[in-house]
Image (tube, rainbow, N blue to C red):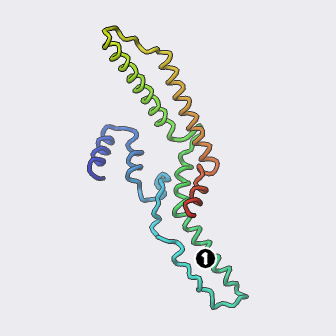
Amino acid sequence: MFGRMGNYLQQLQQSGNPNFQQVQDFYFPNPDATYRGAPTYSGGMGNPYANINPYRYSYMDAKENPGDKLFADLIRAQTQDYMTRFAPIENFLASEITATGTKALAGDLQRTRDAIDTSSANVQGTMNRDAARYGVDAQQLDQNTMTSALVGGLNATRMRDSDRRLALLSGMGGITSKAQQVGR
């Protein structure tokens, strides 16, 4: 672990924060692809197609189906490429799905609560400063309005998580189409 990030992670771990493992996995993923489904992008073998020699079967008689053998080599390389680069990412995304949403829901809900609380405090502070300029007492924010904003924000967060779950269930969020577009 490097510099300030290492210090931060060490303090996070010592404080007993339950998010420590997620933060560490995000910044310093374990190279073992089986570890909690964490994606690895390198695969360690470079170009899987580099070992395919298109002339390997050119000495063969047509009755021995050299084209089929070359095609089988290509399919094996494609399968290895998929298993190395794409399957770990799909496994990681699939492991994020729960019965009611995704594993990100709790963190998203907390961030929504924090954002609503912070914005309410900012509005109250602005109202207090404005009232102080005129020498009058500031009014308190309407609690019903704050509660409505919080409920609306939490409901929207749950809906986004439900949409994320459905996207993951129906084709892994479009990974396949995005990967095809990158290759063009």
Name the spot of residue 56 as percent of width and height, x first: 59, 86
Q: Quadrant of the C terminus?
A: bottom right
Name the residue at 56% across, 33% down.
158
> To which residue does mark 1 refer?
73
Residues packed near mark 1 inside 10 Å, few (<14), some (14 to 19) or many (20 plus): some
Q: How many marks?
A: 1
Name the spot of residue 39 as percent of width and height, x first: 48, 55
Describe residue 99's horizontal placement relative to residue 1 as left or right.
right
Q: Amino acid at mark 1?
A: Asp
Q: Residue furthest top?
A: 136
Name the spot of residue 179 as percent of width and height, x first: 57, 59
Q: Secondary structure at mark 1?
A: helix
Q: Is residue 156 above or below residue 146?
A: below
Name the residue at 63% across, 88% down.
58
Describe residue 22's horizontal placement relative to residue 96 as left or right.
left
Name the residue nearer the viewer: 51 or 130.
130
Name the spot of residue 144 as percent of width and height, x first: 50, 15
Q: Residue furthest front?
A: 134
Name the residue at 59% across, 67% down.
79
User: In the figure, residue 61 lies in which quadrant?
Assistant: bottom right
Name the residue at 41% across, 54% down.
29
Q: Is residue 140 above or below residue 85?
A: above
Describe residue 79's horizontal placement relative to residue 25 as left or right.
right
